Every structure is written in C-alpha cells, then in structure tokens.
Image: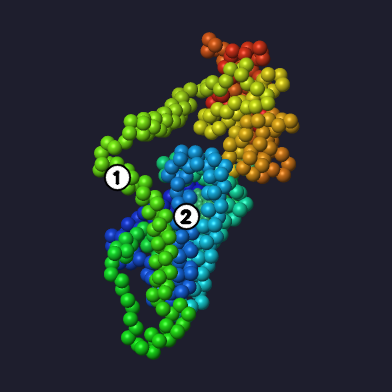
Amino acid sequence: MLEAFLYVGFPYLALTLLVVGTAYRFLFRRYTVSSLSSQVLESRALAFGSVPWHLGILVVLAGHLLPFLAPGLWQSLVASAAALLVIEVVGMAAAILAFLGIVVLLARRVLVARLQGVTTAVDLVVLILLAAQVLLGILVAALYPWGAAWAPGTLMRYLHGLFTLSPDMLLVSEMPAAIKAHVVLAFGLFALVPFSRLVHAFVVPLEYLVRPFQRVIWTNVRRAERLSELPGGDPEEGRRGLVRGLAGVGGAMALMAIGVFDKLARFVKGDSMSKQEKETLLSHKLERLEQTAEQRSLELERMRTTLIPVAKLGDLKSASGKYFIDFEMRAALAFKDELGVPILISAKCTHLGCTVGSQVDDQGRILCPCHVSYFNVKTGQPNEGAPAKAPLPHLAWALRAPDGKVVASRAPGGEIQGTFNPELVDHDVCVTQASERGEA
Ligand code: HEM
Ligand code: FES
C-alpha cells in the first residue's frame, strides 16, 4: 500500500502539482517566476556556487533526459564500452561539481548575514533537498555503477510507464533503498517547484543576452567604498564569473546548434545532397523504421498468441544460450540440459536489470557483467555473495510439432507433460504464456 503510494500515487500527485502550480504562477503570478537574484547582496560566493552548480546539474540532467527521451539512441550509445565509460566518468564529474556548487550556495544562505533576511524556510528546504538528491545520485552511481546500462531497462521503463499511464511499480520497489530514495526525492522536488524559486528553471532568460547592461550604483558613498574593499564586494566581478560560466555552456550549446543549422542550411539551399549521401540517409531512416516495425510486430504477436517459437529443439545448446523476447518484452535465454530437455530462463538480472550473458561457464552458470552476478542455469540461483539476491525465473515451454500440435510442455518447477523425446529436433521449442514464471 505504502509502496503503491510512493511509486505511483505520489509521482502523479507531484507531477500534477508541478504542471498546475507552475501554470498558475505563469498565468496569475507572472512576476514571481524568478530566481529572485541575491547577487547584489553577495556576489563572490554566488559565482563560486552558482556556476559549478548550474554547469554540473545541466550535464547530469541531460544524462537523465536523453535515455528517457531517446532510449533507442541511448542503448546504441552505451553498447560501446568506451562510450559507457565516458558517460559514467562525465556524469560523476558533473555530479561532484554540482554538489560542491550547491554546498557553497547553501553555506552562503546560512552564513552571510545580509542574505539571512531574504532567505525563506522554503529556500533552505529546497537547497538541502537538492544537495541530498545530488548526494544520493552520487551514492547510486558509486554503489551501483554502469547505471547508464542498467537504468534504461528498469528505472527508465518505470518513468515511461508513468507517462504512458501504465506504471509498473515493481520496477522500482524491488530496487535497493538508495535508488528508491533517489526516485521518491526527485518527485518531492518536482512537487516543490511551483512553491519555490525552482520555478525559474522553466524560464530561459534569453533577453538577458541582448539587453543593455544594468549597473547597480550605490548612492551611499561610504557603503560603496566598503563594499568594493570586501572580498567579492564588486558585484560586477561576480557577474563576470557568471558570464564566463554561461559562455562555457553557450559553447557546448553552440556545438549542438551546428547540427540544427546544418539541417536548416540544407533546407534553405534545397537539394544539395549527393546521390550517395541521400542513399545513406535513406537507408539509415529505413533501418530505424524497420527496428520500430519489428518491435511493434513483436508486441502484437505477444498479445495475440499463447505460444512463441524460440528455436528448433535441435538448435538449442548447453554451452551457449539463444536470446529471445518473452511475453513481457524482456530478454530471455533458451538452453538445453544434458538430457536434451529445454531450459528457458529470464535474462533480466534480478539485481538491477542488466541483460545476462549467454555463455555458460564450466560450473553451469551465466554471468551478469554489470556488477558480476553468476546465475546457475538449472536452478536460476545467483552465486554466494553476488549483488543479485533473487534467482532468475524460469519460463514455461511447449514443444510443437511441425503440424502445429503440442507434444510436450513444462511449467516452471513442474514435471514434463506429454511425450518428450530429445530426438524431435525439427520440433519448435516455444515459450508459453499459460503458466506463471517461477523457479525450476
Ligand atoms: C530532481 C531530479 C534529479 C536529480 C537532481 C538527480 C541527480 C543525480 C545525480 C547528481 C546523479 C549522479 C551523477 C550521474 O551518474 O549522473 C544521479 C544518478 C542517477 N540518477 Fe538521478 N537525479 C534526479 C532524478 C532521477 C530520476 C527521476 C531517476 C529515475 C527514475 C534517476 C535515476 C538515476 C540513476 C539510475 C543514476 C545512476 C546513474 C549512473 O550510475 O550513471 N534520477 N542523479
Ligand atoms: S545488474 Fe547488477 S549484477 Fe546484474
């Protein structure tokens, strides 16, 4: 019950608050949609906190958004070990930068006397929660590395389910505590957006780039002198730091914009592509369409049938498995034992959801490479001390003759029904929907 609230009810509540509350502030409290800059009161710590915070968190959030918005592209990216390593290192560096930045921002609000008067309780709560969220993220990335590889199959599917109104809370509720806390706190922060300065994240102040520079001139000469003597007392110095930071972000965005301009230029110039370029482009598009079509037809096939052929009995091996997609659209593997009996087992690691390898070692185990869990193919059980604690579930199978008749079947943990003969090499081994998943 609590879990259903935390992973389904609360996220919807938070997202509703986020959308409705933000829209309300835009429509009826437009002039409160601001970060309420305190630069004029204190600028040095602001620059040392704000620039790393914004640079770091933008990179981190881009790394969260991309796998969610373009899962196909992300999967092909992280399929390369080198790219995965770069993503992990950049993500961690950006997270540490963001954490240092937010600690400075928090310390500044607490310690600088001039800011205490303009700092509300909500400001402090938001800063503390943001720091906690970033720290949790760092903890998750450190304790459960290769998140870029395991999260798309679990957490990103959970998020996708939320947005397509078919949430699957099991994808989170079976995760370790740090990950669950990271997800719930994220929604907590989303809920706080309309009630805090965080709402400024939705405003990209582009006019600031072209608007004439504003100078703050102190009419009190003694105060102005005192301020310029203080370290960081010159508000322009802080502003220059911020501008330098933004220039860095701008540079990165300019690089991305080159792609967009290239497309625009092609559009304006018209048909300037060579025949070969066009062919390559079209074949890429076709490839992507074919992948989508294949995915959809697989989903449809799984909805319409209770039996999906995996391989001919004669093609199954003991030393290496054959991958297939089960009824839940998850990766699974098919083997045969020493008597030639099929073994169908889920290939979704019960630790954090990476796909388990298909090669069987000399102890009859398959390996999940993400955090090294070995699973016994026959029992599904992980090795002692493995990060995965639960066994890989076995799947029910049926043996179908070429004329379509089912001659034998087996539910996980059950006996073989019908007549099984390992000589029936031309028969199809099918995964069946009929029975529940479970241990053999
Ligand atoms: C307020 C929103 C969020 C913030 C500020 C945040 C921040 C972070 C940070 C700083 C990291 C460590 C750096 C990294 O590896 O990228 C991280 C990691 C991670 N976050 Fe979040 N996060 C947020 C929301 C979410 C949500 C909603 C999910 C998924 C449902 C999520 C899933 C993850 C995962 C799986 C990692 C580990 C990535 C890895 O190991 O490479 N985060 N997060
Ligand atoms: S996902 Fe961690 S061991 Fe498999």
Q: Secondary structure at mark 2?
A: helix
Residue 344, image quadrant: top right
Q: Residues within 10 Å of mark 1 (few under 14, many from 20)?
A: few
The amino acid at mark 1 is: Leu
Is residue 194 in view? no
Q: Residues within 10 Å of mark 2 (few under 14, many from 20)?
A: some
User: Which comes before the other along the chain, label 2 or label 1?
Assistant: 2
* Residue named by callout 2: 59
- Identify the residue position indicated by label 1 in the image: 264
Q: Residue at x 45, y 47 (%)?
A: 66
From this view, report whether residue 7 is shown above or below residue 349: below
Residue 128 x %, y %: 51, 65
Give, as a three-letter code, the residue at label 2: Val
Foreground residue among 173 and 299: 299
Instruction: Quote the CA–CA distance across marks 2 and 1.
Output: 26 Å
Residue lying at the far top of the rendered structure: 403
Residue 110 x/y as whole percent? 50, 74
Q: Residue at x 37, y 62 (%)?
A: 200
Tell me the residue at 71%/19% (across/down).
339
